[in-house]
Image (cartoon, rainbow, N blue to C red):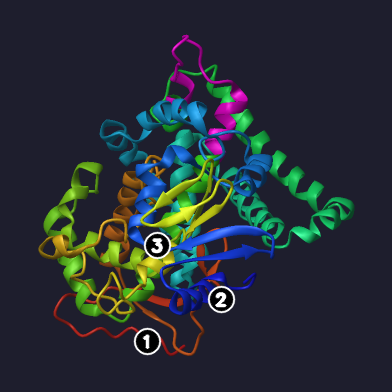
Amino acid sequence: MAHNPVQVLSRYNEAFGDTFRIYLGGLKEAIVTINPLVIQHVLKTNSENYHKSEIQKKRMGHFLGKGLLTTEGEAWKTQRRLIQTGFERKQLEILSSIMQDSLADSLRNFDRQARTGPVDIYPLMMKITFSMVARSLFGARLRDEDIDLISVAISTVQEFMVRQTIQPYLNPWFAVSGELQRHWEMRNRAFAVLREYLQRRRKEAPGHDLLQILMDARYSDGHGMSDELILSESMQLLVAGHETSSNALSWFLYLLSSRPECVDRARDEFDSVLGEKPLTYSDVPKFEFTTQLIMEALRLYPPFWMVDRVALADDCAAGVEIPQGATVIVFIYGVHHSPQYWENAETFDQERFSKAKEKLLTPFAHLPFGAGPRGCIGGNYAMLQMLMILSVLLRKYDFCTVPGQTIEARPMVILRPEHGIRMTFTEATPRGVGRLSDCSA
């Protein structure tokens, strides 16, 4: 279970049905479900009765502070309303130019590495998306070395939080050995960099980035957020805002590397919609086919493979009794791969999310960005980000997966490719000419 809970829970679903009870560590009762009716009840219909688990709030709150990811109740509702402004259409149009500038810088580095031979696309996608989110938050002011420092800190601290969660018996050792302190100091260095930017911005003319939204936000009493709360929200947006996209892009490129007909159709769509102009948020709804491909990739490899909630009071959902204090695990990977809700569930189907098939989809069986009031606040930003990156990568390069490697999904906080995904990128062949890229290296 600690190594690969997805495999274990999938076997349990086959043996015990779409909803079953287990005892985590032999002690804590948990209800695991892939039933869309139960999922809808817990995440949306009666969401007020379900809070994030203490493990999530305690571990994340310790390192990331109190913010949108780690608060509940009225405090969360207030923060959500304030931050939502940063992800509305008007603001996303403004952010588009910042994102394009960041992408241009990142792709120069990507191109240099791709020209040397096969590359692991996972860390490269992480760098591209992290830089884009960081600059969306702090504008062009954030230096590359600071972006790298914060990125490494977030990645290292997240892995440590996972160890604390799945190996809680080691927590006393983490404390006495200095591991806890070492990660705390790494977290403090990242916060210090962000604090310096924030203090500098307080003295400058207003900008057009997400930091300005946080600085300008006002509660009903007229007061704004404290600097510490702005820092916590900034860090949490950095954490949540890049990994979903980088994982989705990595798996997307892997899936399309063996489907040249899909690549050609996506290229045609980008050419038709954009021509030579850069992509902006107003273009997003026009990419019908490419969005279908993204949604299918997110079905097969959902970044967040599960979410958990704790019942505040006794409840019943679709005939399932949920006692007070029980943890409900919404097994997203399981419902995404269930043959009950998907025909040929393990097969990539480029037409599965087409408009013609919309009515065939089961509500709450596809949860790439969560669902209900606590669904991902940055879902529209993520789609803009992914389409923007693909508008360049798909048209500039032919690509294929290097043969002979093990491609395996590892469920940590998100569903990462455990051994990476090595791919070869070559200059795109003109349309109508056979692809000559060699992935045998």
Q: Position of residue 61 (x, y in %)?
A: 64, 40
User: Which element carries disc 1, helix, strand or loop?
Assistant: loop
In this view, the residue in front, 413 or 282, is 413
**Label 3, label 1: how far apart the Cα atoms are:** 24 Å
Please give the label number shown on residue 419: 2
Please give the label number shown on residue 248: 3
The residue tagged 1 is 438
Please determine whether, in this image, residue 399 is positioned above or below residue 228: below
User: Which element carries disc 2, helix, strand or loop?
Assistant: loop
In this view, the residue in front, 217 or 101, is 217
Q: Position of residue 252 (x, y in %)?
A: 35, 68
| Amino acid identity at mark 2 | His
Q: Is residue 315 visible?
A: yes
Q: Residue at x 49, y 52 (%)?
A: 322
**Residue 225 within the segment the image draws in magenta:** yes
In this view, the residue in front, 183 or 138, is 183
**Residue 37 within the segment the image draws in magenta:** no
Which is more foreground, mark 2 or mark 1? 2
Q: Position of residue 330 (x, y in %)?
A: 45, 58
Q: Residue at x 38, y 55 (%)?
A: 38
**Label 2, label 1: how far apart the Cα atoms are:** 21 Å
Q: Are marks 2 and 1 in contact (CB under 8 Å)?
A: no
Please determine whether, in this image, residue 6 is positioned above or below residue 238: below
Q: Residue at x 47, y 54 (%)?
A: 321
Q: Is residue 117 visible?
A: no
